[in-house]
Amino acid sequence: MPRTKSALRKVVTNFSEHEPIRVVPLSQLQVQQAVTVNLTYRGGALIEAAKVFAIYWGRSWENDADARDLSAAMNQFFTDILVSSLMDQLSEYSVSGKTIGHGSFIGSQVITTDAPARSVTDSRIQTALQNWISSGTAPENDKDTIYFVFLEQGVVSVMGGSRSCQSYCGYHNNVGNIYYAVMPYPGCGGCLGGLAVLDALTATSSHELCEAITDPVPGAGWYDDTQGEIGDICAWQFKQVAGYTVQLEWSNMQNKCV
Ligand SMILES: [Zn+2]
């Protein structure tokens, strides 16, 4: 049975009709009812051995001790999670000629130049990311690179007419063949979901990581027209992997969140 219109769908309809679903919704919008899901592969890019590069944009990532600790913890999270069972479970989304496996954390950079003061749009992120790559501030991308852009506390992300902490907690996207995720600082109840800051950030980052791997160009990889990507279906359901709080992801094979 198709499920009825839910809070999640209401949020999703804030985005343009043509925008694929690619966000972590707020925790209070979590969908509780059983869902009917069958993601299908749309023939586009998949990431086989993710190479994550983290960008911490803003002065507080340098100046504030708590922010520095948080960025160090996130770097360790990527180091550990990219070789964990969380990657193994994505292998069911391998297709002929594209095998999803373990990845690696390839480094990080604090960037203070032109850091947003209050908000930052997705198009500004795209321009900045292209500039960082061309200037050598961030490494060149290849088919497996995913840039994670972390915003500092107090900076709101704006995407598709929606804002972080009002309708979402993070998203991933592409500009051409450059794949990236944007992770606002979880500074509101809707994006903390009762978790500590680090746990909220590892949870939402795991969501975006798994989606960026299985659907790097949103809607062109593994996707369900109603439910979206593999993380969307299981938003705000957690487990522990390698000592970190991560989100459950949809398994087509097991027909449930795992
Ligand atoms: Zn998502």
Image (cartoon, grey):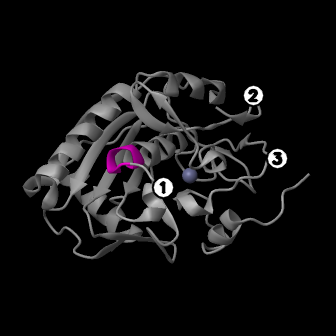
Residue occupying image coordinates x 56% and y 49%? 236
Mark before the other along the chain sequence, 1 or 2: 1
> Mark 1 or mark 3: which is in front?
1
x and y percent of residue 67 in the render? 19, 52
Distance between the alpha carbons at the discs numbered 3 and 2: 12 Å
x and y percent of residue 174 in the render? 46, 54
Task: Tell me the element at label 2.
Answer: loop
Foreground residue among 218 and 67: 67
x and y percent of residue 55 in the render? 25, 50
- The three-letter code of the residue at mark 3 reads Thr
**Relative to 204, is 238 on the left or the right?**
right
Q: Is mark 2 within 8 Å of ligand 1?
A: no
Label at residue 193: 1
**Relative to 120, is 209 on the left or the right?**
right
Q: Is mark 1 within 8 Å of ligand 1?
A: no
Whether residue 136 is visible, yes or no, is no
Q: Residue furthest front?
A: 194
Label at residue 254: 2
Q: Is residue 11 above or below residue 139?
A: below
> Mark 1 or mark 2: which is in front?
1
Q: Is residue 106 above or below residue 193?
A: above
Label at residue 36: 3
